[in-house]
Image (cartoon, grey):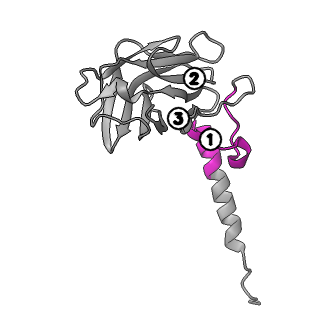
Amino acid sequence: MAWGKPRRGGASGAVVITTLVMVAVAAASGFIIYHNLGEASSSIGIDPPPDGGETSTPSEFTSANYTAAVPGQLAVAVRDAALPANGFNATGTTSTFTCAASPSGAYLALTNGGTGTAGVSYISITSAGVVSEFTPSGECDIGGLGSGSSTTFALFPLSSEVSPTPLSGQDYTGVVGLSDGLSIPFAGAWQ
């Protein structure tokens, strides 16, 4: 039996195969994709949600938006935010929000580019390092693409509690929690 020099790179084939298997398993199991809408889709290799071919960019007050997606079912994103600092304060008495078909006052715009529906179970906002959590007062469902409720607005009353009281221009981060366990991070600055 002749022994030769060991081949270099033999292990790299195993790494490639292992990686492909992991990607296939993740795709088959409905792997959750977080897509930063502030980046070009082609740069990260993920197609934007099917929303008529257009991608929206975050508003000037919502600097980082993400989409929580289950391929073929959900593509829920925070598309816009109007969170005035004077509508939230440490002495506020409300930790709930309502959902409506149109914006009013302080709101987050939630859109779904997928065919499934999603329910919002909570929204948390972190300001000055402190987390404030809000729950829906009533149903808060985001319909599938093409339905009249594929864009839903989470409305916050003027008496909403965020401690310490936010200042205009101060950064915040947040998470929208969906009833199926998905969560969508967002960030911006108080108006």
**Residues at circles 1 and 3 in contact by the CB criterion of under 8 Å:** no
Report how far apart the C-alphas of labels 3 and 2 lie in the structure. Answer: 15 Å
Question: Residue 140: image x %, image y %?
Answer: 44, 16
Q: Answer with left or right where residue 160 lies relative to residue 144.
A: left
Q: Residues within 10 Å of mark 1 (few under 14, many from 20)?
A: some
Range of magenta residues: 22-50
Q: Residue at x 67, y 71 (%)?
A: 11
Report how far apart the C-alphas of labels 1 and 3 lie in the structure. Answer: 10 Å
- Asked whether 190 or 74 is in front, the reply is 190
Amino acid at dot 3? Thr
Residue 43 located within the stretch drawn in magenta = yes
**Which quadrant, please, contains the N terminus?**
bottom right
Q: Answer with left or right where residue 73 lies relative to residue 171.
A: right
**Residues at circles 1 and 2 in contact by the CB criterion of under 8 Å:** no
Q: Residue at x 36, y 36 (%)?
A: 167
- Asked whether 119 or 191 is in front, the reply is 191
**Element at label 1:** loop
Whichever of labels 3 and 2 marks the residue nearer the N terminus, that label is 3
Q: Residues within 10 Å of mark 3 (few under 14, many from 20)?
A: many
Q: Residues within 10 Å of mark 2 (few under 14, many from 20)?
A: many
What residue does disc 2 label?
111
**Element at label 2:** strand
**Residues at circles 3 and 2 in contact by the CB criterion of under 8 Å:** no
**Which quadrant, please, contains the C terminus?**
top left
In this picture, is 87 found above or below 148?
below
Q: Nearer the viewer, mark 1 or mark 3?
A: 3
What residue does disc 1 label?
38
What residue does disc 3 label?
62
